[in-house]
Amino acid sequence: MRKNPVKQDIADVQRLQEIISILAENEASHLVKKLGLSSYMSARHRHKSEKPSPERLREVLEELGPTFIKFGQIMAQRPDLVPEKYIEELEKLEDNVKAFPSEEAKEIVDREIGLETFDDFTEEPVAAASIAQVHEAWLNGEKVAVKVRRPGIKDQMTTDLDLMKFMASKGEQHSEKLNKVKITKIVDEFAEWTLDELDLEKEASNAETFQRNLEDEENVKVPDVYPEHTTQKVLVMEFVDGTKCTNDERIDELDLDRKMIAETGIRAGLKQTIRDGFFHADPHPSNFLIQEDNTFVYLDFGMMGTISPKTKDQMGLILMHTLNEDIEGAMSLIRDMAYVEENADFEGLKQDIEQKMLELRNSSLKDNSITSLMLEITVSASQKGIHMPSSFVLMGKTLLTLESVGLAIYPQFKMREEYTKMAQKMLLKNNQPKDLIQSLAIDLIQNKELISKAPSKISQTIDSINQKQRKEIIHEKASDNKKAVIVAGLLISAAIFAVNSPIPSSIITLITVTEIILAFFLMNEAL
């Protein structure tokens, strides 16, 4: 990808002018000015300052093409950045586009993996979207889905992504609000996700990782992929049938176990976010199916979110603090996670959180939405100059979608009780005593020089005290040195023992914890 859009060839400049023209012609001249791109507008539009209605904005994004449609879909998941009335309209954005000719699809498949690979290949696609379309086929007697990337789509989207980065950069220079929300970072993240989604080998790898992560969930289905028949342009995976989770009438006909399905969806969502740190970041209801045996099916793995181990725990703890109405605990974590503006209003945010927690406590069961509350807190924080990471917001939207699906299927689901139970279990699984001890042990070994010099450090501290005080404590010096030596020995012993001991883990945990507690008790005495 080229780094400097300003120096791109004339075709790209023409595309930029086309984008600006479409915006200006559709009541979006205000947006063009906000981006600092007025010079690209025609003279008749420069004096105007319209804001597009939500419906018009959706229509404009659809007219601008697949890159902007996908950006609109992502923005529909960012209530911290986009007003609610626009989100409701952007959620209607779909990738329903005309299929490209079947002959072209067959040519791509033949060139990439060979049409002779399949027993049969259905010419008419069963689904078509902006990046690819899907054909049914049979492979060694098994029905499979063959996803074929649109010809030319990579070049088209790469050009538009470069221009979006250019527009975001100009926007940060000309708009204080866009600068505060770091719009260039948002667009950079979007570009990275989109380029990954163009690579169908990457999607296959995502599906395999996702499947491994959730293999302990008996009622979750992730379609098998065929990596040996997959390239950047063609993805072959198991064909899965099922009922859309929004088809309430069909769910009734099948007499499904609604409670089980709701529990499965919520539990799987928490495992992805709090336990695995690898979650489905495109949570449209159409990406979930339900089978007749109550199996919850995931589809489409092009866009996945990832979060670090530290952030996983922070997210889990914020969830627990919210459930327990621990405002101080939640505020502490928000301070640690957020990007904070100079004049951020933490006191105002604290008052908002108190109010929202009170509303949650007094809400009816069907309105008892934990993740909705968390997203409302994120929105409030953003309005007060406290911006949570994109991964946190996307994670919240993923959980909210699964929560909505669960409650739509089984309105009696006791969300608060289940969230508490599941979140506690995930956090404990992430932080096993043996793992915590080993982390501490590694840190102690890395700092063994500092620990081994503890006796001399204590001596230096005592020597630095004035003469009168020295006389009063000199008789204690030898004793302190002995304690310090014992402290160092206990800590290093605990570290090495935890990492290398062949003794069963339960005994390691007991001995190591005992050594560390004793060491810190003696250290406190010595100092």
Image (cartoon, helix red, strand yellow):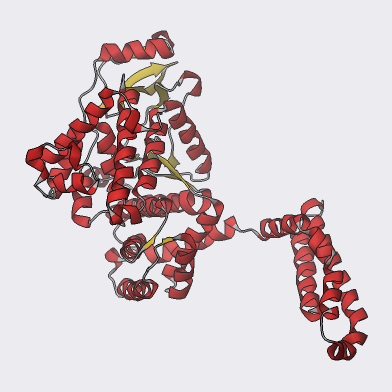
Residue drawn at the location 31% of the way across and 61% of the way down: 379
Camera-nearest residue between 335 and 378: 335
Residue drawn at the location 26% of the way across and 37% of the way down: 68
Taking the image as drawn, is residue 326 in sight?
Answer: no
Camera-nearest residue between 495 and 52: 52
Number of marks in picture: 0
Q: Position of residue 72 (x, y in %)?
A: 26, 43
Q: Position of residue 477 (x, y in %)?
A: 90, 81
Rendered position, 441 above or below 523? above
Q: Quadrant of residue 516?
A: bottom right
Q: Position of residue 100 (x, y in %)?
A: 24, 19
Left or right: 42 in relation to 225: left
Camera-nearest residue between 18 and 210: 18
Left or right: 470 in relation to 53: right
Q: Quadrant of residue 102?
A: top left
Q: Quadrant of the N terminus?
A: top left
Residue at the left extreme?
44
Left or right: 93 in relation to 305: left
Taking the image as drawn, is residue 424 in sight?
Answer: yes
Residue at the top extreme?
116
Residue drawn at the location 32% of the way across and 12% of the way down: 106
Q: Position of residue 140 (x, y in %)?
A: 45, 15
Q: Quadrant of the C terminus?
A: bottom right
